[in-house]
Image: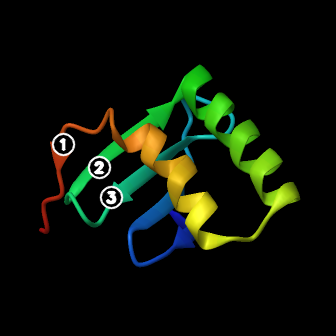
Amino acid sequence: MHMLYNSENFAVMQHAGDDHPHGGFEIVDKTSRREIYLAGLLADHFQAGVERLIDQTDDEMLIDEFLSGYTTLAHHPVVLH
C-alpha cells in the first residue's frame, strides 16, 4: 500500500495487486468516515482523472472536490483493526 494523497478531508492509497496491472485505489472520506475501493476499469478511469487534475492544479480544495465525486459511492464504514 502506498499513500498517494492525504488532506484534512480525504486519504488515497494505492494497492498493488495481481488481479489488475495497476492494483486498485482506496479512497477514504474522513468527514463521513466512509471508504471505497476502486479496481479494474474504474481504477483506470480514476487514475487518468487524477493525472489530468494534477497537471492542471495543486489546489487541495479542487482535488478534494474531485475525490468527493467518487466517495458519494462509498458505503463501507471505516473500521479500525
For badge 1, the amino acid type reads His
Q: Residue 29: which numbered mark, if any?
A: 3
Mark 1–mark 2 CB contact (< 8 Å): yes
| 66 or 33, nearer to the observer | 66
Left or right: where does residue 8 sit relative to residue 24?
left
Q: CA distance from mark 3 to mark 1?
A: 10 Å
The x, y position of residue 71, in whole percent, is 37, 43
Looking at marks 3 and 1 on the same chain, the residue that comes earlier in the sequence is marked by 3
Question: Are the residues at dot 3 and dot 1 in contact (C-beta closer than 8 Å)?
Answer: no
Q: Give whichever of discs 2 and 3 has the lower sequence position.
A: 3
Which one is nearer the viewer's eye here, 11 or 14? 11
Q: Secondary structure at mark 3?
A: strand
Kindly indicate whether the residue at mark 3 contacts the one at mark 2 (C-beta within 8 angstroms).
Answer: yes
Q: How is the image coloured?
A: rainbow
Which circle marks residue 35 in the picture?
2
| Amino acid found under the numbered disc labelled 3 | Asp
